[in-house]
Amino acid sequence: MSVVRDLRVLLRLTNFRRLLAVRLLSQCADGVYQVALATYVVFSPEKQTSPTAIASAMAVLLLPYSLVGPFAGVFLDRWQRRQVFLYGNLLRALLACGTAVLVVASVPDWLFYASALSVTAVNRFVLAGLSAALPRVVDEERLVVANSLSPTAGTLAATVGGGLAFGVRLIADNSDAVVVAFGAALYLLAALASLRIPQGLLGPDSTVTPQRLTSALASTARGLAEGLRHLAERRPAARALTAVALMRFCYGALLVTVLMLSRYAWSTTESEGLGLLGIAVAASGAGFFAAAVLSPWAVGRLGPFGWMTLCAGLAAVLVPTLGLFFDPAPFLVAAFVLGLITQGAKIATDTVVQTTVDDAYRGRVFSLYDVLFNVAFVGAAGVAALVLPPDGRSPLLVVLVAVVYAAIALALRRERTEG
């Protein structure tokens, strides 16, 4: 396979291997920490989980990406990137240890969330630094392949980290503090792995004088505003982004529903609930993988808006058909389908943005895309917190989500017809 061959060539590059090791350990630790946070909020026996608590946890996990992400590059162009990996991961290890202590101490929720927020905020700098450093360890000829394989490997590492978190929690007799401490240990290993990379290798170049910090931050803000204005002039891209954000909103609302159902309606014990949640997450992940395989063919046959229309239309029909039973089996089928639909729509949206937005604005538009994607997810959790009853059984929310999907399908069909 060409992917295996390309990866074998890249792995012959010593500093690429070292940078990849930092990425894999960092993102594996992220997966552990995120699952630890989710299980503490949703499945701790001493806590009465509510949709509001889940919404708060999602905000902690996702909002730092949205708020910090566009401005991370300003600082990364001033700091040695190797040092960002070293001190960033050391800081996260220390902060994660603090989170573990807070879990044991049963402190007020706001203090726990503040600790978790500090860990996830640092994550944005590490991930952005990994992308910025890649051209320093890979030649231009192999850069496209490296840009494809490296983030994919990181995503797989985060998934493995989530699985390890479930395993550690089981071995440690459902101790969330032990799982968080395990994540802290992985952050420490990522920091130590960065020491194998020469300090000045990853840049930025010391010969280039960076723009003043205040000017750089203001310039970034102006750039995002210019990207928003450019997006308003590109109707296909704007409509695709609006559609995918609304579909992400629907996915987020249903995810909170599954969390509450797993915790209260489908299980009598914590372990049983966690097992059902793990199966639902795996089913959704299988849908994401299926979308990666199916979407290139579907977009080629139907066009990006045709594929998005089909995805939204299927969701409008299947969500009430499967979801209104509030039974595990239909919901697990729905998890797979919604994973496929959500990721398929995102792949199509990426294509629309890449082909309709001018190259000079593409980076800024994708930054806005990232913000929109995460804010929609957090907003969905907030709406679910207002609508869902304690056991997660809400026909109103399921019907509302189906109506939103139907409206998206109709709007996209009009866009395809007019286009």
Image (cartoon, rainbow, N blue to C red):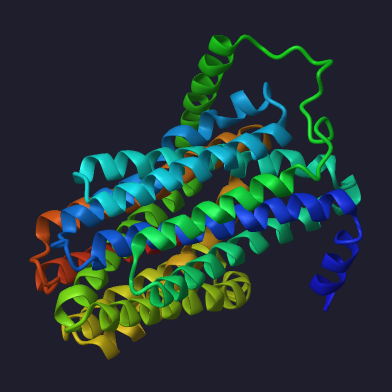
The residue at 78%/55% (across/down) is 146
- 286 vs 212, left or right, is left
Query: Which percent across, then down, holds residue 361?
Result: 61, 33
Question: Which residue is more in the foreground, 296 or 278?
Answer: 278
Residue farthest left in this picture: 389
The residue at 79%/52% (across/down) is 18
- 88 vs 307, left or right, is right
Query: Which percent across, then down, holds residue 343?
Result: 48, 66
Residue 52: in sight, yes or no?
A: yes
Residue 350: in sight, yes or no?
A: no
Question: Which residue is more in the foreground, 54 or 415?
Answer: 54
**Quick check: 107 above or below 178?**
above
Question: Which residue is more in the foreground, 270 or 323?
Answer: 270
Q: Quadrant of residue 156?
A: bottom right
Query: Which percent across, then down, holds residue 346?
Result: 50, 60
The residue at 12%/63% (across/down) is 388
Q: Quadrant of residue 3?
A: bottom right
Residue farthest bottom in this picture: 329
- 167 vs 392, left or right, is right
Query: Which percent across, then down, holds residue 17?
Result: 81, 56
Question: Which residue is more in the foreground, 83 or 415?
Answer: 83
The residue at 39%/82% (across/down) is 279
**Quick check: 210 above or below 419?**
above
